[in-house]
Image: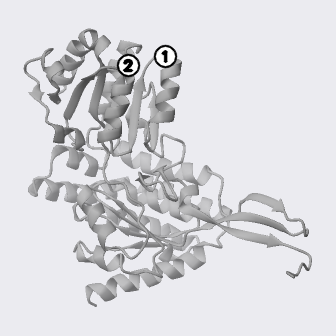
């Protein structure tokens, strides 16, 4: 079978799966998710064995340490996958929910009911946990999922899909609800995004190049997240020890993620008090600092930042640092350079915190908390399909509700239009 026919056959299988899963009861979906979690835990050794093959190939290909970190399945991350399945099972089922109802003068009632989107294709790179997260959310929201992971995680993803499909089959769920494109040829993606009428929405998760390629070639609606250029602003009224801890966590805890801080903005009123110890702490953690001229005046070993640096998503231990005049200057900088993913302010001033929340136009805006919490699991969504920086249909971490749409329902007792 050629590649085009192969992808088409998978999409047709998913379409059948979507029709079937849309009517499966909450009880069955929840039971399947819990058993999937148990199976993931029991098969932890198999998953690590498959993952080691991916890591070996990744090292041979010369992938960065940050990319290999995203790829690696540790005992803790496998447990996180299982816990994500359990949390999604515990969430209220959105399907069939009537979100509003109103009565017209002629006595008929008009309302909106939440329904599945249908077939959701997710194209992703590196992180194999996405396979389980996406499956959990799509199934709970009554959708079929077409999974297409990156070549660097092919063995891990195959192993995870094998576990999930096996449980689905045992629980009477159509296997087409969990469909996997296990072809590493990038042309498979181009074939997928042409399948208008079979696939309802495409969610690409990965590098900016992948997302732009999908967006430019797709005939299907695309929910986009180009990159995560995230900022933390340390205000003059910040608790500076809190600010130091938040900024360190935002950059260093997992620099290879899209919600890691890429630029730290510091109010000039506290720069002299804050920056020397902060920069020292970053350098001890092997963070490469690129700074504005004022930052360089505190530490001459800092590399001078150029304008293009402030647009970059490093996903590595590299950080831009800029001293700003005040909160207005900080928000102006964010408006110009941000990718509209996640921004944070550290301040004890309530009015400035509220201004930051209202005026900063990003998918997630935080006060006195690390950008690393911008995540569906951390927000209590159980897991996420991705983080949308679009403004249409969904924005921010995409949980169950974001994987549904609504239809109008009308109840009457014989009304006729005259």
Please tell me whether residue 407 is drawn above or below residue 247 in the rendered image: below
Q: Is residue 175 left or right of residue 107?
A: left
* Residue marked by disc 1: 349
Residues 166 and 214: in front is: 214
Q: Residue extending furthest front? A: 418
Residue 270 place in picture, x, y as percent? 31, 12
Bin the neighbour count of mark 2 within 10 Å (Cα to Cα): few under 14, some 14-19, many 20 and up. many
Q: Taking 155 as reference, is 271 above or below it?
A: above
Label 2, secondary structure: give it: loop
Q: Residue at x 40, y 81 (%)?
A: 195
Colouring method of the image = one colour
Snapshot quadrant of residue 60:
bottom left
Image quarter where the N terminus lies is bottom left
**In the displayed structure, would residue 60 be above or below residue 345?**
below
In the rendered image, the vertical position of residue 388 relative to residue 300, given as above or below:
below
Report the residue at 42% width, 46% height from top.
Answer: 79
- Where is residue 10? Give x, y as percent: 40, 81
Left or right: 286 with respect to 401? left
Where residue 30 sits in the image (x, y, percent)?
61, 59
Residue extending farthest top: 273
Q: Is residue 155 visible?
A: no
Q: Which mark is residue 235?
A: 2
């Amino acid at each position: 079978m050629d590649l085009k026919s192969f992808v088409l056959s998978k999409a047709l299988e998913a379409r059948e799966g979507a029709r079937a899963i849309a009517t499966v009861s909450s009880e069955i979906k929840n039971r399947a998710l819990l058993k999937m979690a148990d199976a993931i835990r029991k098969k932890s050794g198999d998953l690590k064995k498959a993952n080691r093959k991916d890591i070996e190939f990744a090292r041979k290909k010369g992938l960065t340490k940050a990319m290999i970190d995203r790829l690696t399945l540790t005992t803790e991350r496998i447990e996180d996958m299982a816990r994500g399945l359990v949390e999604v099972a515990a969430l209220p089922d959105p399907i069939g929910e009537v979100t509003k109802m109103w009565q017209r003068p002629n006595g008929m009632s008009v309302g909106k009911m939440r329904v599945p989107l249908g077939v959701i294709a997710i194209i992703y790179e590196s992180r194999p946990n996405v396979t389980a997260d996406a499956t959990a959310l799509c199934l709970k929201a009554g959708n079929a999922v077409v999974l297409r992971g990156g070549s660097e995680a092919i063995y891990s993803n195959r192993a995870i899909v094998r576990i999930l499909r096996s449980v689905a089959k045992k629980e009477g769920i159509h296997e087409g609800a969990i469909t996997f494109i296990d072809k590493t040829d990038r042309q498979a993606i181009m074939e997928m995004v042409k399948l208008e009428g079979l696939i309802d929405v495409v969610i690409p998760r990965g590098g900016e190049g992948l997302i732009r390629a999908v967006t430019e070639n797709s005939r299907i609606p695309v929910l986009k997240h180009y990159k995560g250029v995230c900022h933390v602003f340390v205000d003059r009224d910040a608790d500076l020890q809190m600010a130091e801890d938040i900024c360190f966590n935002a950059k260093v805890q997992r620099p290879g993620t899209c919600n890691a801080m890429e630029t730290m903005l510091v109010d000039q009123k506290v720069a002299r008090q804050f920056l020397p110890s902060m920069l020292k702490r970053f350098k001890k953690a092997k963070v490469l600092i690129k700074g504005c001229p004022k930052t360089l005046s505190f530490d001459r070993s800092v590399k001078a930042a150029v304008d293009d640096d402030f647009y970059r998503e490093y996903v590595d231990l590299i950080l831009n640092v800029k001293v700003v005049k005040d909160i207005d200057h900080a928000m102006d900088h964010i408006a110009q350079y941000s990718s509209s993913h996640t921004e944070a302010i550290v301040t004890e001033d309530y009015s400035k915190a509220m201004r930051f929340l209202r005026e900063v136009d990003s998918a997630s805006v935080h006060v006195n908390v690390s950008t690393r919490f911008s995540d569906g699991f951390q927000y209590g969504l159980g897991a996420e399909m991705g983080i949308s920086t679009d403004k249409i249909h969904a924005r921010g971490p995409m949980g169950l509700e974001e994987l549904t749409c609504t239809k109008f329902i009308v109840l009457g007792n014989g009304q006729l239009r005259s």
